[in-house]
Image (tube, helix red, strand yellow):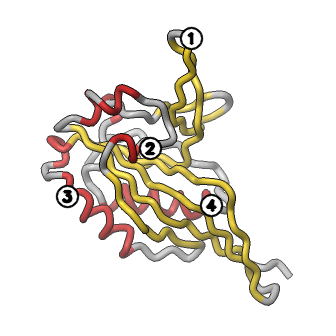
Amino acid sequence: MRNIKPAPKPDIPAFFDLVITKIQDTLVSELPWLDHAFGKAQELVRTRDNRDYRYPGVYVRRDEYQNVEPNQGLGNYSFFVLNDPQQVERHQNQYGRVTADCALILWVDLSKVGSDIEAVKAEVLGVLKRMRLVVGNFTVNTISEKARNVFREYSLKEVESQFMMYPYAGLRFDGEMTFLEQCNS
């Protein structure tokens, strides 16, 4: 049994967080090597050497964020980037479909996974394809593995050098996340 501190999740998930928490749970249960499945990351900024650096942070609680830039102290982990704008589509006032471009980003130590990057890619994609979510879905359109693509929203120079060299690797599964809104009338 793995002794892993769970990634923070909303107490009462709503909207896209409902879809994300279901995916988080599935990833942790289906990928034995995944230590943490974090939720949505926000773009945070810190100043170093008189320059602003953008990095991903996952909200934990009251003014506290977990930095999820490549970090071997976190083990193998994933997080989501949910992009704006979100498209809303209504169908005969029965329900609405809300769609957003989204990415699932993983950072892994391949020596602890026990396989190469192609096997990890296939395993994660297989889990995502088999997943059945009632509240929505996540459809993968592209996969990236180069540092400049995986962490493209962020200014992480370290990622391009030491944190993306074997045995470390990053993967980005870009696609669309859909939330199916139920009509209350």
Disc 1 residue crowd, few under 14, some 14–19, many 20+, Cα 10 Å = few
Pointer 1 residue: 50
Give the CA distance from mark 4 to mark 2: 19 Å
Type of the residue with mark 2: Pro
Q: Name the residue under label 3.
A: 118
Discs 1/4, front: 1
Badge 3 amino acid = Glu
Query: For the residue carrying disc 2, how many other residues have a C-alpha within 10 Å: few (<14), some (14-19), or many (20+)?
Result: few
Secondary element under disc 1, as helix, strand or loop, is loop
Q: Distance between the residues labelled 3 and 2?
A: 27 Å
Between the residue at mark 3 and the residue at mark 4, the CA separation in whole angstroms equals 29 Å
Task: Name the residue furthest bottom.
Answer: 92
Question: What residue did someone put label 4 on?
Answer: 16
Counting residues from the N terminus, which is met first, the one under dot 3 or under dot 1?
1
Give the image quarter of residue 162.
top left
Of label 3 and label 2, which has the lower sequence position?
A: 2
Query: What's the CA distance linking mark 1 and mark 2?
Result: 35 Å
What secondary structure is marked by label 4? helix
Pick whichever of labels 1 and 2 is earlier in the sequence: 2
Q: Which of the two discs, 4 and 2, sits closer to the camera? A: 4
Given contact means CB atoms under 8 Å apart, are the residues at marks 1 and 2 in contact? no
